[in-house]
Structure formats: C-alpha cells, structure tokens
Image: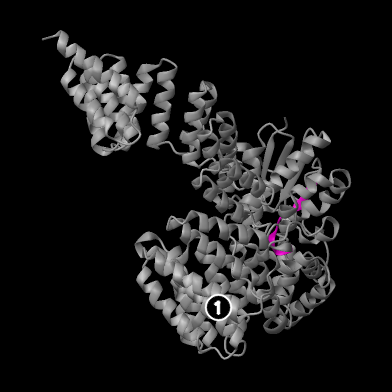
Amino acid sequence: MSEHLWRTGPRAEAFGDADFEVDCHSRLRGPYTGVGTLLRALVPAVHAERPDLVQRHALEILSAAPELSGLIGAGPQTLTSLAIPSERTRIYPANRTRRLAHGVFEFLRSHAELAGHDPLTLAFTNLDEADHTDQEFVAIALRRSGSGPLRFVVTTRTEHVDEELAASLRRYARQTVPAQRPDFVGTEEEALRAFIDGDCTSDDPRLLAAYAAAADDVRARLHDERAARLTGGDSSLGLGALLYHLEHGSDSAGAGSIAMLDAANHCFDMGFYNMLLDIVPRGRAITDPDAEQERHWLLTTKMTTALASLDRSLESLPYYDELRERHTLPMVHLFCSYAMAMLYTRHHPPEHKDHHQAKVLLNNAVAIASLLPDIEQRTFQTVFQNNGKALVEMHLGNLPGSLALVNEGVRRLDAELDPEKHQLHRSVLLNNRAKVLVALGRVEEALADLHAVIEVDPNYPDYYFDRADVWRRLGEPEHALADYAKAMTLTAPFLELHYNRADLRAELGDLEGAITDLSYVVELEPDQLDARINLVSLLIDTGSFDTARACVDEGLRVHPEDARLLHASGLLAMETGDLDLAAKEFDHALRIDAQLVAARASRAALAHTTGDQNAAIEDLTVAISLDTGNPDLLYNRGFVYQAAGRYREAIDDYSRALVLPGADEPGLLHQRTMCEAELVDHR
C-alpha cells in the first residue's frame, strides 16, 4: 500500500498523482473547506452508483457540504435541526465534529473498497491554514486508514498545525519538501486583482506585497466586486470567501457585520465552535456595540457558549461582565444570568463550580422572565429558566425539587402556549423529567416519558440511548439492544453507544459481540481507557492473547504510566507463562497506584502460584482494607491461608465472605468444611 505523504514548504506545487486535490484554507469556505470540497466533487458520482452508501452517511455529508441536499435530500431531521432560531434550546456537544469526521472517513473508505481503488489518493493542501474541522478529519483519517484503500497527501506551508494532526503526521506520513511554484509574473494591478480574486489565500510574496501597497479604497472596491460575484453561490462561501470580502469591503459595519452574525449563527447551530472563536472577534471588531446592540450581544454570546463547550468556560466570564456593564436590555441580562449559571453548575472545572451561585443567577433570570411584556415569551422564558434551575437542584441533591420544577414547566407549556409552539423544548423537558425520575428510582415513569419523547422526535439518537439504559434497569435487555441498534442508524459514529452495548452484550454472554463493539470504540478513540481495559479483559477471557497484547501495547503507547494497563500487561504475562514480566508489571502498576485493588489481587495470585504465601496474604490484606465489601477477596485470602495450613484464619475469612452480597456460597461452604476437617484431623 502506498504511503501517506506530508509535504511542507511555502507555495508548494500541486501533487499531480492525486485522484482529488482540495484546498483547505479556511478563508475559502470556513469549517470543512477541504472535506466539503471533496464531497461536492465525489458524492454525485457515488450517489449515482451507490445511493444506499450516501444515505447511510447523509448526516455527515450534509454537515460538511450542505449544498448537496438538493441531490441527496435533507437526511434524518430532528426537532433540533427543524427548530426556528427563537425556539432552538439545544446545542450540540463539541465532540460532534469528531463523530462527523469518523463518519466521513468511513464513507470514503467504503467507497474506495467498493470501487476497487488501490489506493484512492486524496490530497489536502494548505492544511495548516484550515479550520479545526478539516485538521481534525485528516488527523483521524491518517490514524484509521491503516493498510486500507485510502492514501493521503497533506501539504502545509509550515509545520504549525493542531496537536492531534501533528502527531498523526509524524507517525503515519513521510515528510517531504515539495517543489515551489514560481513567483507571480504581471503588473502590480494584476497582482492585486489576482490576490483578491484568489480570495486572499495566496502566500506568493508578489501578491501579498501588492495587496499591502494598495490604497484602502481600492482594496475595498475590489473586495466589493469579488463579493458581488460570489453572492448567490454555494452557501458555504458565506462562511469563508464571501464573508471575508464583505468584512473588508466598503460596508463592513453593515453588510459585513450582518454576514458575520449569519455565519456565527450557522456555526453555532452546527457545533463548529472553533470557527466561532475566529468569526466572532472579527464580527465584534466591525459591529458598533451601541448602534447595533442586539447584533453585538448575540455575536458575543455565541463566542461565550463556544468557549464553554470547548472546556474554556473561565475565559467567557469577562465577556458576560462586559455585556452586563454595557447593555440595559432585559434579554441581555436574562441570557447572561442563565448562561453564567450553567457555567457554575455544569461547565466550570470542579474547583470553580458553585451550584448555590448558579441558583442565585437563575433566580435573577426567572425574575426578569416573569416581567417580560409578551405573554408567550414570558411563559416560555420562565419555563426555560426554571428548567435550568431544575438541573441545579439535581446537582444540589434536591431531586423532588428538581422534579417539581420540570413538572410545572410541562404543565405551563401545555396550558399557556399553542401546542405547535416550542416543540423542541417540550421534548427537552420530557427527557429531563425522565432523567430525574430515573434518579428517583421511578423507572417505569421514566420509560413512559421516553416513549413519549421518541414519538414526537423519532430521529434524535440520544433518546434511544437514554431509553436503552432504562430498559436495562427494567431487566429488558432485548429492548435495550434494539434501541442501541436504532440509535446507530441515526447518528455519525457515537462511541458511547458501542461502549454501552458492549457492556450489555458481555452481561448476556455474547463475548464476541462485546469484543467487536469495544474494538470499534478504541479504533474510534484510542485514548478510551475504560473501553481498552474491558476489551483486554475479554480478549484474555477468550484466549486471544496476541490481540490482547497488541491492544495493551497500543494503550501503553498513548498512556505509558496507566496503572490499569500495566496490570493488564501483567495478567497477559501470567497467562502466557512469563511470570517474571508479570511480577515486574504488577510492581510497576502498584508503584503508580498503590490502591489499585485488582493489581493487589493479581500480585497475590502470582505470589501464591510461586509459593510465597506470606506475600500473597499481605497483598490480599491490603486489598480487603481497600474494598471491604468484596467477598471474592476474602475467599482468595482464605484460600491462601488454607494453602499455608492456617485453617482457623481461613475459616474466619470464609465465614466473613458468606454474609456479603454476591458471595459464592457453595464454594465458600465447601472450602470451610475442608478446613474444619483439617482441624479435626490435626487434633
């Protein structure tokens, strides 16, 4: 299989051997500039031959290349995607772009396999100038491509790329220095026009110098002309080139500012949060906060939400202070109070969380909402703020209070608003009530709410995920498996679905099915430690030692000092007879985490095997002190005592274990009887 290439250097020549070459510079089309360009070129032909493959990945394709909706349809719609802006109350998680990237990769891989490409060569240029979405995709695709039918050629002007992409390039691609394109030849005026007509993405020094030397009014006029030519074209141009030209044209404070808010709204709705951190500062810079108050605060709050979603919530607080200081609009203070409350109860790092402060802020938001002059807005906003307060009450441990707030919200929306209004938030309330009911142990009622919410929003995958959990609690595993399977048809790759299904499959004895799911989880995200540990355990149980060793080694490459992985490595060594390595790995694991009970128990088992009963007893005694309700540890120590001829101590451990939940009563009684017989024989 052909190797991947990383070509670094300014003004690189095109790569002539690629089946597709796409420019990823974010100034062209914003998020997914490169991926979207590739899909717009590739999907029509694939759709003609394999419409089923395209439909299976419609969500990912349309997220990156929305212009293809006219060809392939809209894909599965949810209340979230259909909600009008004033009723949009749910935002996507930041990791949604990772799911989309995995889905696009699997679409491309499947197409290449079915078409018999060997390989399909895809060239992504200017990747260091790309948005996070394109860099994330290529990083994932390089890692997952293995010896498959896809070959990637990456071109960057410098080596300054996202950390994940840099790691993938270093590991999976061979770095080369490409030939450079010749300098532009032409007049200064021609160079200026060439730079602007190329959407200001060139790194040719002649073009850059011509643009820098031009008069402001000349530059603005040429930006206006280019914007006029782009207007009415693909919608994604409004996130890149068209947006840039309006921003730098003669009406930046008007048309440019409006375009910035439109682009920010789209990125917000799609979960393209890194791009928001690029767009919003640019938009704020050309928006008069006094003359365009609403546009200014809406832009700002898009950025603060992006910061919170990207685990940078502390950085958003000064912006909320700025808005509250500058504006007297009630909706500004309402939104800021709610948003800051969510920071304190949900988004902030643990040491900065303050649920009581969150409740103070939400009480303020409720007070403002109750005074809004419009009846419909007053009802909705009051219910919405109280729904946030219900979350705070959950975090404070007041489950009945949380349930009461959600119930009142459901009642008010039903009684006071048109039943066709705010369908999304009605479904959110029902789902939230189900979560509170589960926490209260009222699982049957939670199931009824989830049935109801799925009936009104049947294409939202998270609801099936939640209902599967409820089915499991009710002892209905087949229904849970059906919900996991349904959810998988409605979403881009979603590792939590496969992780939970693996857990259920293992419970049901379907070890091969569980291994398949967990293998997929660690293929998607190699740093998923719990999944990797569970996978290794199942591989050992099924005798797949070579596969287990490869899985452990890959995990230790990512997390070299993880105690659980070192313990797993020791278990593998024991299974394959390398007792010295097993002892080394157990010792290493316990140096890192002296309270890792499993490693204590395993080292005790090794000591018992090698005849060192005192060492085994010492480790098991520590393990029992750490996990006092574990009958198996008492059983094991009793067995070691028994092997050492210390029958009274063994009997005591077996007796203590017998009264604990989950004890192996027949085995314990048998061993205790044997010890009692030994004591009789030795009188």
Residue 24 falls inside the magenta stretch: yes
Asked if residue 553 can be seen in this view, the reply is no
Residue 26 appears in which quarter of the rendering? bottom right
Q: Is residue 655 shown above or below 409?
A: above
Judge by depth and name the residue closer to the eye, 352 or 177.
352
Residue at numbered disc 1 = 412
Residue type highlighted by circle 1: Arg
Counting the numbered discs, the total is: 1
Residue 402 appears in which quarter of the rendering? bottom left
| Furthest residue toward left | 683
Residue 421 percent coordinates (x, y):
66, 76
Q: Which residue range is magenta in the image?
A: 20-28
Task: Count neighbours of disc 1 (C-alpha within 10 A) and say few if under 14, some if 14 to 19, many if 20 or more.
Answer: some
| Furthest residue toward top | 681
Q: Secondary structure at mark 1?
A: helix
Judge by depth and name the residue closer to the eye, 242 or 664.
664
Q: Is residue 261 shown above or below 565?
A: below
Residue 525 percent coordinates (x, y):
56, 43
Residue 639 percent coordinates (x, y):
27, 20
Residue displayed at 50% across by 70% down: 407
Residue 472 falls inside the magenta stretch: no
Q: Is residue 395 shown above or below 539?
A: below
Asked if residue 435 can be seen in this view, the reply is yes
| Furthest residue toward right | 48
* Quarter of the rendering occupied by the C terminus: top left
Residue 438 percent coordinates (x, y):
47, 56
